[in-house]
Image (tube, rainbow, N blue to C red):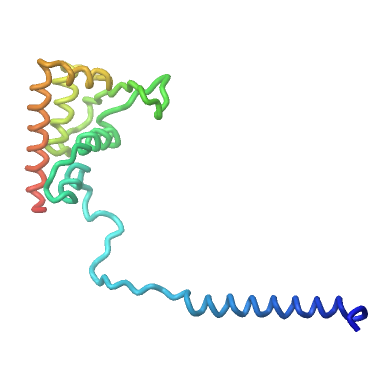
Amino acid sequence: FLMQYGNYLVLGVGAVLIVIFFYAVLKAYRKYDKEYVPEFSGDYYRELPASYPPAIMSYLVNFKEINRNDLTATLLDLIRKGFIEVDYTNQSLTDKDANYTLIYNRNMDKSQLTDFEKYTLEWFFDIIGKRGDSITLDDIESYAKKMNNAEKYKECNMKWNNLVKKEGKKHTF
């Protein structure tokens, strides 16, 4: 009997096992694939309700504290807005010792910038860059390392922090 019908028996058992497997998968899918019902019932914003600069958003998120990365984020935001261009000729964006050149586009209308964004441009290009239109990352680093510039750098940083806080207070965060 096994010799004559053995292949059919194996085929039949395999088919039954496949049907049982798909039945189990379907049953598990119906049991566990349910939409999660959130407990939150307020308004949900996919985007921010306004276009705040990164330092102001950080001020809000960090409970009115200025983060050390906020200045870098402000510089990157000014690059995004077109006030500063980055020249990284012959350098990779991932180079550890990259020395990018930041180029100030003085022709842009600064009327839409906040006071601390305007001061960022003044600080880096007029104070550190000595009223030039470009500055390198090495220039910024060497400026801050010189003892006679360290106090001025600290003073500028404190002024920048106060301008960010002042702007944050305008938004009643």
The image shows residue 166 at horizontal and vertical percentages of: 7, 42
**Considering the image in quadrants, where does the N terminus appear?**
bottom right
The residue furthest front is: 2
Image position of 4 with respect to 115: above or below:
below
Q: Position of residue 35 (x, y in %)?
A: 41, 74
Q: Residue at x 59, y 78 (%)?
A: 24
Q: Quadrant of residue 122?
A: top left
The part of the image, by quadrant, that contains residue 69 is: top left
Vertical placement of 47 versus 43: above or below? above
Q: Looking at the image, which is closer to me, 26 or 120?
A: 26
Q: Is residue 50 above or below residue 32?
A: above
Q: Residue at x 26, y 37 (%)?
A: 77
Coordinates of residue 153 in the picture (x, y in percent): 12, 24
For residue 96, side relative to residue 30 (left or right): left
Residue at left offset 15%, top offset 16%? 146
Q: Residue at x 14, y 39 (%)?
A: 114
Q: Choose between 105 and 126: the one closer to the eye.
A: 126
Closest to the observer: 10 or 33? Answer: 10
In the picture, measured across the screen, residue 86 lies left or right of residue 26, that is left
Indicate left or right for 101 with 154 as reference: right
Residue 140 on image: x %, y %: 22, 21
Is 97 drawn above or below residue 74 in the view shown?
above
Q: How many marks?
A: 0
